[in-house]
Amino acid sequence: MAETDNLPEFGEPAQNGEDTAPAAGILSQYVKDFSFENPNAPAIYQNNVQPAIDVQFNIGSGKVADEVYEVVLKIEVRAQAESQTAFIVDLSYAGLFGLRNIPEDQLDPFLLGEAPRILFPFARRVLADAVRDGGFPPLLLEPIDFGGIYMAQRAQADEQLAQPAGEA
């Protein structure tokens, strides 16, 4: 009999009662960095033109302790009304996630796809409140499929790695 015959299946409790099931939980969430600029106040309030809104996202993650990861959702918003900047918002909203028994190949999909999905509604509220408190109508961002974006970027990266050297 092979020695591996006594090992539990993935996710099943070991004979000694050790929990081997994957577990993920949010430990904390917080505003890590925040800036709101209204550089053309009060003149911007006289402008009746609907501003053009540009929204950029960036997601980062890092291990901060054993089985604890920080995920940072960075949102940058710039609103332009004709040639005037209406407002600029930079928000870094973060969460600490406890991850136990997660297979190594599933860490990135969770940290860069699922964790931002969990954080987004809270970051969206902070952003909407800041824009409203700056004297503008609240900015309500549409839901974002972070998992789909991660999978598309991963497929694109895999495709680029599969190309023979010299092709671009």
Image (cartoon, grey):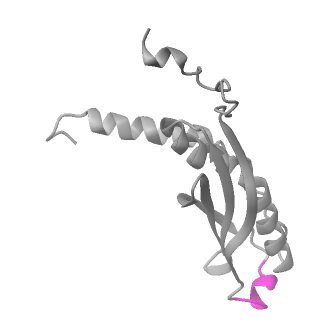
Q: Is residue 10 magenta?
A: no
| Residue ID at (40%, 38%) | 156
| Residue ID at (65%, 80%) | 85
In this image, 45 relative to 164: left or right? right
Q: Which residues are magenta?
A: 40-47
Residue 117, position as x, y percentages in the image: 69, 47
Q: Which residue extends farthest top? A: 1
Residue 132, position as x, y percentages in the image: 85, 73
Q: Which residue extends farthest left? A: 166
Please tell me which residue lies in front, 20 or 58: 20
On the rendered image, what quadrant is the N terminus found in?
Answer: top left
On the rendered image, what quadrant is the C terminus found in?
Answer: top left
Residue 28, position as x, y percentages in the image: 75, 61
Q: Give the answer, above or below, for where 1 lies relative to 7.
A: above
Q: Give the answer, above or below, for where 70 lies relative to 84.
A: above
In this image, 167 relative to 147: left or right? left
Please tell me which residue lies in front, 100 or 51: 100
Please tell me which residue lies in front, 3 or 67: 3
In this image, 155 relative to 54: left or right? left
